[in-house]
Image (spheres, helix red, strand yellow):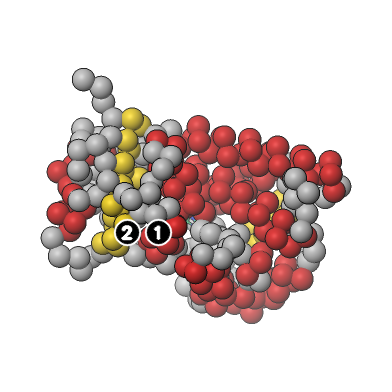
Amino acid sequence: MTGPRIIDGKAVAAEVRAEMAKKVAAIKSKHGQVPGLAVVLVGEDPASKVYVRNKGAQTVEVGMNSIEHKLSAETSQDELLALVDTLNKDPQVNGILVQLPLPKHIDAELVLNTIDPIKDVDGFHPVNVGRLWIGERALVPCTPTGSVILAKSVAPNLSGMDAVVVGRSNIVGKPMAALLLRENCTVTIAHSRTRDIENVVKKADLVVAAVGIPEFVRGDWIKPGAIVIDVGINRIEGPDGKGRLVGDVNFAEASKVAGAITPVPGGVGPMTIACLLKNTVEAFEMQTGLSADA
Ligand SMILES: Nc1nc2c(c(=O)[nH]1)N[C@@H](CN(C=O)c1ccc(C(=O)N[C@@H](CCC(=O)O)C(=O)O)cc1)CN2
C-alpha cells in the first residue's frame, strides 16, 4: 500500500522564486528597472525578526531591491503612519509590508489601511479584499495564494470540489474561501461555532485548516483521499520538554487517511514569502504598466 503524498512546500516555493527571478531579469533587461519591496519591522519579536530577514534575503536573491525599516518597540503610531506615507509616495517602492504582530499600542488595522492599495503586497487593504471578492485584479494575501498553489500542485483542476476552510480570519480563512470560489469549488467556512464540525469537514475533498489551534483537525475528520492543506504554525512543548512546531491538523492521524497533505514545517510556511515576491512583481506591473512580456 502507498502512503499519502506529502506536499513539499519548500520545493514548490523554490519553483515560484525561480519563476520570479526569471521575470525580474526579463523586466530589467527590457525596461532597465527592478521592483522594490519595503518591509517594516517594529519591535523585537524573535520570529518576526527571522521572517523579515528571510524576506529581505529572498527579495535580493530574485534580483529585486529590498528596503528594510527596523523600528524600536517604542515607535509611536504617528511615526509609523508617517513612514508608511513616505513609502506610499516613493516611486522606488512598489510593495510595502508591515510585519505583524505590531506592538499593542499601535492600531494595526489603521496602519494596514494607510498603505496605498496598489502597493499593498499583503493584500490586507479593504480595497484589495473587495476586488478579490468581486473577481477584479487584486493583490491577494500571500498565505492563501500559496495554499492554492500547493493544492493545485497535486490536483491541477479544483473545479467542483467540496472545500472546507476551517477558520474565518481576515488574513487567511476569508481570502482562502474567495480564492477557492474563484477555482469553482463549493466552499464552506467552518469555525468555532460550527455545529458538528467533524462531519462538516468529513464531506470535504479539500480541507484547509487555518484556525490557530494546535492539531485541532483530527484524522477521523478527514474523508479518505482528501487533500489537506495545513496553514497552522504552532510552537508547542514536546514530551522531551523541547519546543516543536505543529500545524492545525494532527499530521500523524490525518496522513493515514488523506490523499495528499502538507507538513508543518515545510508546507504552507515557505510559500508565504515566495508569494510575497510574486505580489511585489504584480504590484510593479500594475503601477508601471511594464512587464516581463511587454
Ligand atoms: N504582514 C504580515 N505579517 C505576518 C504574515 C504575513 O503574511 N504578513 N505571516 C506570518 C509570518 N510569516 C510571514 O510574515 C511567515 C510565517 C512562517 C513562515 C515559514 O516559512 N515557516 C516555516 C517554519 C519557520 C519556523 O521554524 O519558525 C515553515 O512553516 O516551514 C514564513 C513566513 C505572521 N506575520
Q: Which residue is mark 1?
A: 181
Q: From the viewer's perspective, is residue 165 above or below residue 236?
A: below
Q: Mark 2: which secondary structure?
A: strand
Q: Is residue 257 visible?
A: yes
User: Could you tell me residue 287's position as x and y percent?
Assistant: 73, 62
Residue in the picture at 48% in, 47% down? 146
User: Could you tell me residue 129's position as x and y percent?
Assistant: 50, 69
Q: Mark 1: which secondary structure?
A: helix
Residue in the picture at 38% in, 46% down? 158
Q: Are marks 2 and 1 in contact (CB under 8 Å)?
A: yes
- Circle 1 packing at 10 Å, graded few (<14), some (14-19), many (20+), is many
- Disc 2 residue type (three-letter): Val
Q: From the viewer's perspective, is residue 280 above or below residue 157?
A: below
Q: Which residue is mark 2?
A: 187
Mark 2 or mark 1, which has the lower sequence index?
A: 1
- Disc 1 residue type (three-letter): Leu
